[in-house]
Amino acid sequence: LICRVCKFQVGALCFHSRSPCTAERDQVCETTKAYIGKVPLFSKYGCSRTRESCNTTEQKDAVFEVSYNRTCCETNLCNAAGPPRAAGLPLLSGLAALMGWWLLK
């Protein structure tokens, strides 16, 4: 199983891309998308570490109420991004969230 890899994507722009990974025996391809409410912030994708949290949404950040939606799939390059789209709102939202986090540190 070969999975696409991007450590940080905002809109259609991947800022930390790597060569595709080869999943080990118990791994699947995953995509994680971060949101504030319904506003997308960023995505990341690659080979998963565990199947247990596949197809789940969890809230890890109580300050900004960021939720993380994790989906998994089991065919080659199935976690590839969809067609490119404008990065305007997601890019601005992601940058605003990062700046807010940095200011509160």
Image: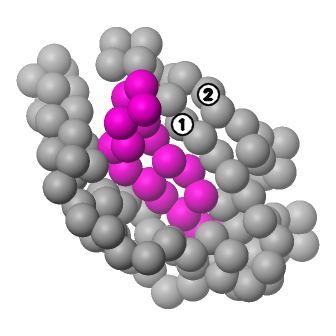
Q: Residue at x 32, y 69 (%)?
A: 85
Q: Seen from this angle, which residue lies furthest right? A: 25
Q: Amino acid at mark 1?
A: Tyr
Q: Residue at x 59, y 41 (%)?
A: 69
Q: Amino acid at mark 2?
A: Glu
Q: Is 55 positioned to the left or the right of 34 in the image?
A: right
Residue 7: x, y in percent? 42, 63
Q: Earlier in the sequence, mark 1 or mark 2?
A: 2
Badge 1, how many Cα within 10 Å: few under 14, some, many 20+?
many
The residue that label 2 is drawn on is 58
How far apart marks 1 and 2 lie (CA) works out to 5 Å
Q: Is 98 positioned to the left or the right of 6 in the image?
A: left
Q: Reply above or below: 63 against 16.
A: above
Start and end of the magenta stretch?
31-48
Figure quadrant of residue 98: top left
The residue that label 1 is drawn on is 68
Residue 35: x, y in percent? 42, 36
Q: Main secondary structure of the magenta part?
A: strand
